[in-house]
Amino acid sequence: MMILSSTDILAMEQRYRATFMNSISGFKSLQMVGTISPSGQTNIALFNSIFHIGANPPLIGMICRPDGDQHSTFDNIEKTGFYTLNNVQQNWYKQAHQTSARYGLNQSEFETCGFNEQYLPDFKAPFVQQASVKLGLELREINVIKFNGSRIIIGEVKHIILDNGLVATDGFVDLEKAQSVTVAGLDSYHSTQKLARLKYAKPENQVEELIVN
Amino acid sequence: MMILSSTDILAMEQRYRATFMNSISGFKSLQMVGTISPSGQTNIALFNSIFHIGANPPLIGMICRPDGDQHSTFDNIEKTGFYTLNNVQQNWYKQAHQTSARYGLNQSEFETCGFNEQYLPDFKAPFVQQASVKLGLELREINVIKFNGSRIIIGEVKHIILDNGLVATDGFVDLEKAQSVTVAGLDSYHSTQKLARLKYAKPENQVEELIVN
């Protein structure tokens, strides 16, 4: 067993600490964020800090660092008010990883990395055509974390484009069927193997498997 | 292909929509949150909206609904300022799921669900002894989402207890070796299968696998 204190963490070499802290909190939701600038330049950025906030209204949050690669995405979302989230699939996760390279401001990751733009009427931001689960969001709130200056972008889901056959009769979206991958840390990609769905837990009952088609 | 609008989402039956929206945003980080009340009553709650915020200082966020099951956890964190995050493992994920049942205020999920409390000197909150990756956090900030009243709890990692052999030479924590599961929606548990770690992407390079021991 290893026991580390705050002092040990802060004494780590910077890149070692980034890799360590990014991987220690568990497997994460991975999405390609699609945006467009007011002048029409499209962009894809990989985000791994996506979280469910509520179902009614349907809200999703994500963390945007104050500096670095995510700047264009933040700028586009703030200026246009719209963005998309697109799942990353097992058969092209390497291509998705490539969108995290620092391309020039006038280069679109759609073109350089081989993804197609897809649009819905009356919705500005580009979807990634190849993805099997696509969400179109409208910006609702930007929350600043005082302690380190990161921003929490909160959006409401306004449009969904889903491949057929992914939704169970109780509304469950089968991410394994959708070929979605999960990520650990900044660079470790994983497919998944379902163990089980479990019934709503009650104090007086044993845990039971939930089977829904 | 299915295309859904905001109107379609809002017209869904309430439980269907909760299941749908909770699962659509991707696989999630799952943690058992350990807390203790000022009078000494311990508590475990399952959280699946955990996200990395930054490595220096090491900050982790999580969403807490304004109502419902997570009330005791929120209350304990607000009053004591300390909590723990403990990974859920493949060989006892059903036991972890059982902690989400609504036990009485004077029943501890540690005892009722068969988990052992573990403590570090000078740190109030209980760790789950069985977990292989355990984080002790100090509350730094509570951020309210105006749009739906949810709270974002932000804590700084002050202590880490890790099983041996989980950390690679570059700081990467191997969650697969740690037997951590990921969750989709509210109740679907999954183990993972590593595809690859990938090198830092650069515009002029092809994607390459990263091998670190």
Image: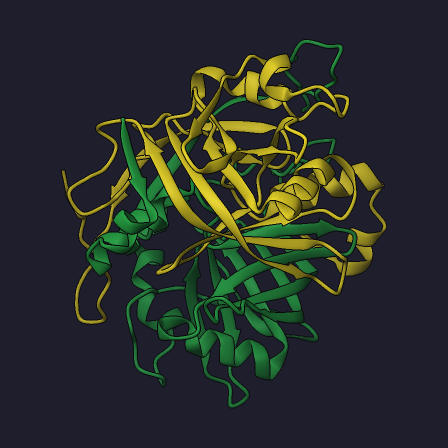
Chain colours: A green, B yellow
In the image, residue A142 above or below residue A170:
below
- In front here: B129 or A7? A7
Residue B1 seen in the figure: no
Q: Nearer the viewer, residue B8 or A165?
A: B8
Left or right, A113 with reference to B149: left
Q: Quadrant of residue A212?
A: top right
Q: Residue B12: x percent and y percent?
A: 82, 45
**Any part of residue A126 in sight:** yes
Count of marks overlaid on the render: 0
- For the C terminus of chain B, which image quadrant? top left
Instruction: Tell me where residue B120 appears, x and y as whole percent.
Output: 41, 31
- Compared with residue A189, is residue A102 higher up or lower down, i.e. above or below? below
Q: Residue at x 73, y 34 (%)?
A: B69
Would you place residue A186 above or below residue B186 in this image?
below
Q: Position of residue A85 (x, y in %)?
A: 54, 59
- Residue drawn 54% across the image and 67% down it: A145
Q: Give the camera-side residue of B147 and A132.
A: B147
Seen from the viewer's position, the closer of residues B82 and A122 is B82
The percent coordinates of residue B107 (x first, y second) are 71, 19
Q: Residue at x 51, y 20 (%)?
A: B93
B122 up-or-down from A207: above or below = below
